[in-house]
Image (spheres, rainbow, N blue to C red):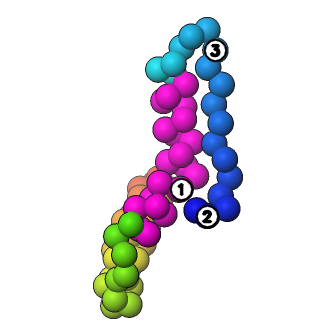
């Protein structure tokens, strides 16, 4: 596995649901799950990879533009 940061969440007052929600948010923010999914998919042609990256960047650009208005 990659040398990413470990995600730890402590459970307080037996509130497991809150701790699980917090854990999921930290994992999503960290990006470990998406990296693992990419590795599991296997090799992609460079053209396909560039096309997906361009699509992702377009979506992020539109999101940032919406936030700025």
Please tell me whether mark 2 sits on a helix, a strand or a loop: loop
Q: Residue at x 61, y 64 (%)?
A: 2
**Quadrant of the snapshot with the N terminus:** bottom right
Q: Residues within 10 Å of mark 2 (few under 14, many from 20)?
A: few
Q: Is residue 8 left or right of residue 65?
A: right
**Hey, which quadrant is residue 63 in on the image?**
bottom left
Could you tell me if the residues under marks 2 and 1 are in contact, i.e. CB atoms within 8 Å?
A: yes
Nearest to N terminus: mark 3 or mark 2? 2
For the residue pair 54 and 62, the one nearer the viewer reads as 54
**In the image, farthest residue toward the front:** 1
Q: What is the CA distance from the residue labelled 3 to the residue labelled 2?
A: 29 Å
Please tell me whether mark 3 sits on a helix, a strand or a loop: loop
Horizontal and vertical percent position of residue 60: 43, 64
Horizontal and vertical percent position of residue 57: 42, 72
Q: Is residue 32 left or right of residue 52?
A: right
The total of numbered circles placed on residues is: 3
Can the viewer see residue 58 in this picture? Answer: no
Can the viewer see residue 66 in this picture? Answer: yes
Q: What is the CA distance from the residue labelled 1 to the residue labelled 3?
A: 25 Å
Nearest to N terminus: mark 1 or mark 3? 3
On the image, numbered disc 2 is attached to which residue? 2
Query: Which residues make up the magenta segment?
Result: 19-39
Q: Is residue 8 left or right of residue 56?
A: right
Q: Residue at x 38, y 66 (%)?
A: 40
Could you tell me if the residues under marks 3 and 2 are in contact, i.e. CB atoms within 8 Å?
A: no
On the image, numbered disc 3 is attached to which residue? 12
Q: Which mark is residue 32?
A: 1
Horizontal and vertical percent position of residue 13: 61, 8
């Amino acid at each position: 596995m990659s040398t990413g940061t470990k995600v730890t969440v402590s459970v307080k007052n037996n509130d497991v649901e809150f701790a699980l929600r917090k854990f999921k948010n930290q994992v999503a923010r960290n990006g470990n799950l998406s990296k693992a999914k990419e590795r599991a998919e296997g090799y992609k042609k460079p053209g396909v990879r560039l096309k997906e990256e361009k699509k992702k960047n377009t979506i992020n650009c539109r999101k940032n533009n919406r936030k700025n208005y």
